Amino acid sequence: MKVLLIAESREGKLLNSCYELMAFAEKMAAETAMFLVGSDSALPQYGGKLYLADVSAAGEYNPDGHKQLILDVVAKEQPDMVVFSHSSYGWDLAPRVAFALQAAQISEVVDVAGSTMVVPVCNAKLRRDVAPKTAKTVVTLQAGAFGLAEVPSAAPVVEKLTSQSGGKIEFTGYEQAESGGVDLGKAKIIVSAGRGIGKPENVAMIADLAKALGGEYGASRPVVDSEWVEHNRQVGTTGQTVAPKLYVACGISGAIQHLAGMKKSEFIVAVNTDKDAPIGDVADVLVVADLKQFVPALTAKIQAL
Ligand SMILES: Cc1cc2nc3c(=O)[nH]c(=O)nc-3n(C[C@H](O)[C@H](O)[C@H](O)COP(=O)(O)OP(=O)(O)OC[C@H]3O[C@@H](n4cnc5c(N)ncnc54)[C@H](O)[C@@H]3O)c2cc1C
């Protein structure tokens, strides 16, 4: 099995998702080659062959152009699988590459067993096992699902690609999302509300506990989607990635998209009525309790100190 890993760079910086792609390849016990539109000054630490297209010529965001470059590498390397991150870059490019190769595409893979890929369905409440029926497969990997490979000290063997400008899309730049004054990325303590809080009025008890601990409050996606909490407080793959000293997850089940945003926290406490909730797998302490009783009681104890 040979896989072509599609690394990414943004504004001159290599994204460390390339080490997630490498972790996936390790799990597959696959031979690898890597592709990157980037620059000589931001190469991955990688012991294999890296096909590098210079970003100044290929453009940072040019799906048509990048697709052609990838197809050229596929023609040379003949990989069985082309592997993208499930990022905005992967979402755009993977289907184009799959269509051109007439290959099966499997999106948002969270696990793998042999040729069977596991993907979440129904908002990650269920998992679906799928296997490709084509010789080549294109996959995208959910952020955080495979962890990071140990970073090798080796430098890649670089083969430079020549690219032509053009394509149907003009990339005009990035726009900073409004932070609304909250930067969860800098918070040392975060208390997050999940769907288990039950109703919007209960956000206040989460915010109170966060305040008593000297931290900020965050939320899982359903709480944000319900407009109980503003989006800049969402933790997870489509929200912020945080790594505070203490993360308190209240009424959060521990879906992979949430875990990807907080599992690097130093100490994790989860409050959940379900002792088998998946959040328990990453939590240092799992408090099996009704948060509506436990959280105000804990806040009162802390305030009394
Ligand atoms: C492409 C994509 C991107 C996503 N991005 C994100 C993201 O960035 N962030 C994110 O969070 N999710 C994200 N999701 C959604 C994710 O899959 C889950 O649906 C979501 O994280 C679940 O949120 P939750 O844990 O709050 O709710 P649920 O999964 O419904 O869990 C609620 C938990 O509360 C517990 N509970 C219920 N009542 C109580 C109580 N009284 N006291 C204590 N515990 C109680 C339950 O036992 C349960 O474990 C994404 C999904 C997709 C498909």
Image (cartoon, grey):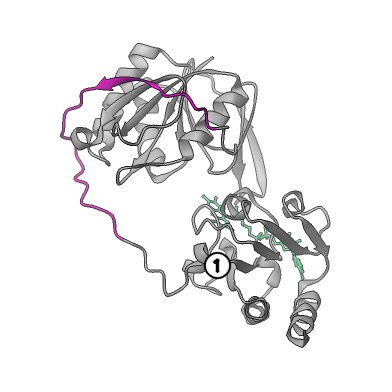
Report whether 249 appears left or right of 218. right
| Residue 14 found in image quarter | top left
Is the residue 23 above or below the residue 303 in the image? above
Along the line of sight, the residue nearer the viewer: 242 or 126: 242
Residue that protrudes farthest toward the bottom in the picture: 304
**Residue at the image position 69 percent from the left and 73 percent from the top:** 198
10 Å crowding of disc 1: few (<14), some (14-19), many (20+): some
Along the line of sight, the residue nearer the viewer: 264 or 279: 264
**Residue at the image position 52 percent from the left and 68 percent from the top:** 233
Element on which disc 1 rests: loop
**Residue at the image position 53 percent from the left and 43 percent from the top:** 143
**Which amino acid type corresponds to the residue marked 1 in the rendered image?**
Ala
Q: Is residue 160 magenta?
A: yes
Residue at disc 1, CB closer than 8 Å to ligand 1:
no
The quadrant of the picture showing ligand 1 is bottom right
**Residue beneath label 1, please?**
187
- Which image quarter holds the C terminus? bottom right
Is the residue 144 above or below the residue 48 in the image? below
Secondary structure predominantly adopted by residues drawn in magenta:
loop
Task: Estimate the x, y position of residue 126 in percent, counting from the top left.
Answer: 67, 45
Residue 85 seen in the figure: no
Task: Estimate the x, y position of residue 240 in percent, counting from the top left.
Answer: 50, 59
Task: Estimate the x, y position of residue 76 in percent, counting from the top left.
Answer: 34, 12
**Residue at the image position 75 percent from the left and 81 percent from the top:** 302
Task: Estimate the x, y position of residue 177 in percent, counting from the top left.
Answer: 36, 63
Residue 241 seen in the figure: yes
| Residue 30 found in image quarter | top right
- Count of numbered tags: 1
Is the residue 140 above or below the residue 189 in the image? above
Along the line of sight, the residue nearer the viewer: 64 or 50: 50
Q: Is residue 224 magenta?
A: no
> Which region shows up in magenta?
151-175
